[in-house]
Amino acid sequence: MKTRVTEQLGIRYPIIQGGMQWVGTAKMASAVSNAGGLGILTALTQPTPQALAQEIALCRSMTELPFGVNITILPAIKPPPYEEYMAAVIDSGIKIVETAGNSPKSFVEKFKAAGITIIHKCTTVRHAISAERYGVDMVSIDGFECAGHPGEDDIPGLVLIPIAANALKIPVIASGGIGDGRGMAAALVLGAEGVNMGTRFMCTREAPINDQIKKALIAGSERDTNLIFRTLHNTARVFKNAVSDEVVRMERREGGCTFDDIRSLVSGERGKRAFAEGDINAGTISAGMIIGLLDDIPSCAELLERMVAECRTSLASASLCFRSSSVSDKNLS
Ligand code: NAD
């Protein structure tokens, strides 16, 4: 499976584990890289830039294969020292960075000078075009189905991926709504050269979260997510639970609500506790619509081998189907 994504990142399969707050640790990232994909550490999951440098060193001790670091810049309750996190990434010799949440303009130069390949994740084609112009190496385009922050335009992957592939010269990675080899095959047919998954990787054996959370996610249907922060223009897709239902109720009440009204419900610290303790109602938990398709908790290696095999079969059977229908069309005429 060779695409520009596998070639430029030095990985076996064009499958990337996206940044996930509280999930993208060395255990998760090394498991994905060892399985042939690209594992990604989430910078802000670490409490300090020093702790991030230690996590990078730990990940290196767990895999000899390439892995990257995600840096997401979005509104935060306590804005982290982003510059210091970036310095920790560069000083640690990391060669792949996934940026998200904000324009990459201000940091492309610094990362490129350090020889870093930049994958910029965004949710609109216009932002992807700007990112290409600023000099990023690949764009991960995130459809409305995705977990976390889908942006405000609500364009699903089926539309977003081919438009992005038409508009960009650099490789496009499809993100959001992909959980098996059929989704991967569809993304490749739409013009992507790789796929990015978060929710699917949360439900693997190596994901560093309590099993009760994994079980709750795979028991959920495609209707079991909520969009929160819609009224604050910082939309996030999270699992439908008591906390996110309450946030939606407060946002929809007459007069709406401010961030301060919901801060204690949505804080990342609460989500972190839910992951650690396995209490699905302890906080907000990012989850994509793809939970409706998931029904098991495989290892990362099992998942990637299965996905790639299924992707190959799907591509072959689609082309077979096309060939046989063109034969029968000819017979008809
Ligand atoms: P946090 O506790 O700072 O905030 C919790 C949530 O509230 C986040 O979704 C945040 O974007 C949102 N938020 C904070 N202040 C806001 C405001 N003034 N208006 C509207 N929304 C607001 O978040 P955290 O869990 O400690 O995460 C730290 C940062 O990482 C946040 O910016 C978060 O969005 C971001 N993040 C990263 C990833 C990733 O994969 N790297 C995933 C999700 C979120």
Image (cartoon, helix red, strand yellow):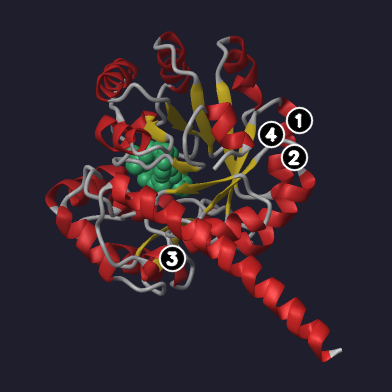
- Mark 3 and ligand 1: say if the CB distance to the nearest ligand atom is below 8 Å: no
Please indicate, yes or no, whether residue 7 appears anywhere in the rendered image.
Answer: yes
Measured in 3D between alpha carbons, the distance from the residue under mark 2 to the one under mark 3, in whole angstroms, is: 26 Å
Q: Circle 1: is it few (<14), some (14-19), or many (20+) Cα within 10 Å?
A: few
Please indicate, yes or no, whether residue 279 appears anywhere in the rendered image.
Answer: no
- First in sequence: mark 4 vs mark 3: 4
Q: Amino acid at mark 3?
A: Met
Q: Do tag 1 and tag 3 residues touch (Cβ < 8 Å)?
A: no
Residue under numbered circle 2:
129
Q: Do tag 2 and tag 1 residues touch (Cβ < 8 Å)?
A: yes
Q: Residue at x 37, y 65 (%)?
A: 291
Q: Return the mark for residue 133.
A: 1
Q: Do tag 4 and tag 1 residues touch (Cβ < 8 Å)?
A: yes
Instruction: Measuring from the top left, give residue 44's x and y in whole percent.
Output: 36, 31
Q: Do tag 4 and tag 3 residues touch (Cβ < 8 Å)?
A: no
Helix, strand or loop status at disc 3:
helix
Q: Return the mark for residue 131.
A: 4
- First in sequence: mark 1 vs mark 3: 1
Residue at the limit of the structure toward the left, as seen here: 277
Instruction: Measuring from the top left, give residue 11's x and y in whole percent.
Output: 48, 32
